[in-house]
Amino acid sequence: MNHPAPKTIGQQYGRRSWAEPWKIKMVEPIEMVSHDVREKAMAAAGYNTFLLRSDDVYIDLLTDSGTSAMSDRQWAGLMLGDESYAGSRNFYHLEDAVQSYYGYQYVVPTHQGRGAEHLISKAVIRPGMVVPGNMYFTTTRLHQELAGGRFVDVIIDEAHDPADPHLFKGNVDLDKLQALIDDVGAEQIAYISLAGTVNMAGGQPVSMANVKALRALCDRYGIRIYLDATRMVENCYFIQQHEDGYADKPIAAILKEFCSYTDGAWMSAKKDNLVNIGGWLAVNDEEVFDLARNMVVVYEGLHTYGGMAGRDMEALAIGIEESVQDDHVCSRVGQVLYLGDLLTEWGVPIVTPIGGHAIFLDAKRFYPHIPQDQFPAQTLAAELYLDAGVRGMERGNVSAGRDPETGDHRYPALELTRLAIPRRVYTQAHMDVVAESVKAVYDKRLQTKGLRMVYEPQYLRFFQARFEPLELD
Ligand code: PLI
């Protein structure tokens, strides 16, 4: 299958450069600590970037989650917080924003994405059920498993190949899904867990054609589709750029159409929605809503705040509206593409096509001499920090965890180190510094040794695991 080359931002606007649709009103100083301090900090953190102190980090690309810069309108919104325990006016603003921009009927606020994952998993999964999805995400799969479900990956094969040029590597493979339905029976399928974009595949999008076809297949069996809408706005940008018939449609219209093929969504508002904390679950089915709205009072807080302060809900409602503006999305993804293009030009192996929220370095090609049980992606994250204080995160063997049945490492096909770009935070100059650091680490790759794990927590081990460097020869 041939794919057209992705359009650059310059081509899209008929000029060479693009710029952010904002100017900076307040700054937060950052500094690079010395190499000596970085070495000590990395050792104290057990070679796990999650265990570093942020004061020891220069450019923080650990995550795009909760790290966005809020706008002046959002900060002003904080002052309008109605902190009533019940019925806060900010909840109704949030409810209206979710209904207007995502199109779902019923909204349950949660403290962040995993709170919403917990509610939907408990509401819909019965023990022994199967949850097919377009690649796992760490917290999502864990909540599905804790509710008694078994996640089955039905993403297209191209998603597992970091160099495959498919423009919609997040697509569901409908043949794989059909085979699964034939095998276990439709009544055993809890729902389809559809993520747009797919984080663990490199921020890869799902096409509109794919979700439409998925809807048609699911309708034949009465299977529901729930969307992980965490980065769905960014997914819509790729539909606008690459899918026939969408070039002239605004992101907001594409978002509404995509969501209309699904039955509900959970959301980590800390990403697309431009806030530092927050989440929501939204569904069209009144029965599921009823269950979730009842459970939220047990696990999160009353159904009109769900673990958020009133002011957080106000900032979130405003963030939703800002997040779907075309110029915002274009510059946000444009910055990711800028960094990715530089690295590609310099021959550094990254996941392509470049995704929406991060650059994913392909650690298997970066360090072909480090076997996967010596954690090449974890090693690369540590090396990047040591080089220039840039913090990324492992998305490979450590993140994949162990198979609950066999207890073995899962050894995913993708062994990646992620450099996630916070929204509206860093400049192009920061991206240049990052690219140069990656290049410096790449240039000395053959002298680099792997790690061994010396502490492994039971759940979501990547957050707290500790490592030691293997001895140099
Ligand atoms: O971190 P939470 O609980 O607000 O959201 C969980 C979550 C759900 N889905 C997806 C696709 C995520 O990426 C996600 C959280 N991601 C993090 C923290 C990240 O660094 O990618």
Image (cartoon, grey):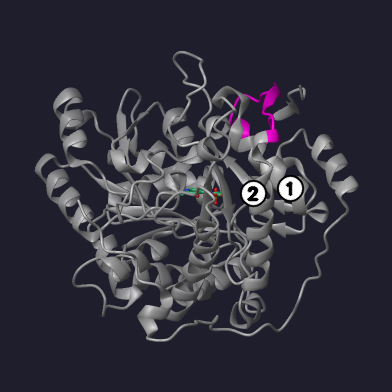
Say whether disc 1 or disc 2 marks the residue closer to the N-terminus: 1
Point out which mark residue 296 bears: none
Drawn side of residue 103 relative to residue 324, left or right: left
User: Extreme left residue here?
Assistant: 220
Q: The C terminus appears in which quarter of the rendering? A: top right
Out of 351 and 326, give the one closest to the viewer: 351
What residue appears at the point 73 percent right and 48 percent down from the top-left corner?
Answer: 385
Please tell me whether residue 262 is drawn above or below residue 400 in the rendered image: below
What residue appears at the point 69 percent right and 51 percent down from the top-left corner?
Answer: 440
Point out which mark residue 385 bears: 1
Drawn side of residue 431 relative to residue 322, left or right: right
Residue 50 in sight: no
Drawn side of residue 346 relative to residue 292, left or right: right
What residue appears at the point 51 percent right and 60 percent down from the top-left corner?
Answer: 345
Q: Amino acid at mark 2?
A: Gly
Residue 321 position in % (x across, y down): 45, 76
Q: Amino acid at mark 1?
A: Tyr
Secondary-structure class at tag 2: loop
Neighbourhood count class around disc 2 (C-alpha, 10 Å): few under 14, some 14–19, many 20 upward: many
User: Extreme top residue here?
Assistant: 406
Residue 107 position in % (x across, y down): 40, 60
Residue 5 position in % (x across, y down): 31, 64
Label 2 lies in ligand 1 vicinity (Cβ under 8 Å): no
Please tell me whether residue 262 is drawn above or below residue 398 in the rendered image: below
Secondary-structure class at tag 1: helix
What residue appears at the point 40 percent right and 43 percent down from the top-left corner?
Answer: 120
- Which region shows up in magenta? 447-465
Q: Quadrant of residue 66?
A: bottom right
What residue is pinned by disc 2? 392
